[in-house]
Amino acid sequence: SGVSKRQLSQSLDAGLSVLLSTPQGAKAFTEHCSREFSIENIRFWCIINDFHKNVDLLRAPTRDSNREEDEKDITAFVEDIYNTYVKAGTDMQINISSAQLKSIEADMAKPGRVERSLFDKAQKEVYNIMSRDSYRRFLIAKTQEDRQIEQKEKGKGQKSSTVRPSS
């Protein structure tokens, strides 16, 4: 029996998650995304992870600092992310639904503290795109690369076996 679309999707999600969990895997996938002109997706995904870490650090209950300044830093980070990846027409604009874009803009327009989860749904959308598209192509490219290396190794082995020692 075949693999369902849902099982394949879950498998791709899990594979991409494992790949991105290591510095080497994240670097290899980033290089692949750069070659296929979709670098904005992996960069956005990474910057949102950094955003979460920064918000957690700045809002830690044990942190002894100026809370008002910390919130200004978080707001500046949000604006930078928006202006770089979300705002229509930017060079690094990610592909998210118009509903998601409107939701982010509405949340940013609200007065008060920025929510840590502001970009979470957009990050999930981007992850799904990477999982279904870029990661699939990454796997295909990696398989082709491995085959080429294997064939080169076979070629080297055949050449060396035909070389006869001189007397």
Image (cartoon, helix red, strand yellow):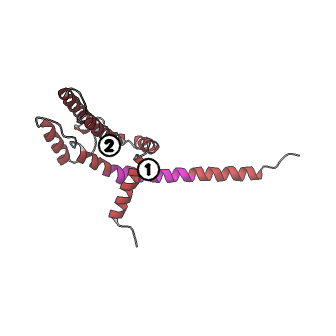
Give the numbered dot on residue 138. 1
Give the numbered dot on residue 38. none
Do tag 1 and tag 2 residues touch (Cβ < 8 Å)?
Answer: no
Image coords of residue 31 (percent x, y): 44, 41
Q: Residue at x 36, y 52 (%)?
A: 131
Q: Nearer the viewer, mark 1 or mark 2?
A: 2
Q: Which residue is mark 2?
A: 45
**What residue occupies the far bottom of the structure in this picture?**
1
Crowding near the residue tagged with mark 1, few <14, some 14–19, many ≥20 C-alpha atoms within 10 Å: many
Q: Which quarter of the picture shows residue 104?
A: top left
- In terms of sequence position, does the residue under pointer 1 or pointer 2 come before the other? 2
Q: Residue at x 44, y 50 (%)?
A: 138
Secondary structure beneath dot 2 equals helix
Decide whether residue 133 is among the magenta residues. yes
Question: Along the line of sight, which residue is nearer the eye, 18 or 59?
Answer: 59
What amino acid is found at the position of numbered circle 2 in the picture? Trp
Q: Residue at x 40, y 46 (%)?
A: 20
**What residue occupies the far left of the structure in this picture?**
111
Image coords of residue 122 (percent x, y): 25, 46
Against 9, is 138 above or below? Answer: above
Image coords of residue 154 (percent x, y): 65, 53
Crowding near the residue tagged with mark 2, few <14, some 14–19, many ≥20 C-alpha atoms within 10 Å: many
Residues shaded magenta: 128-147
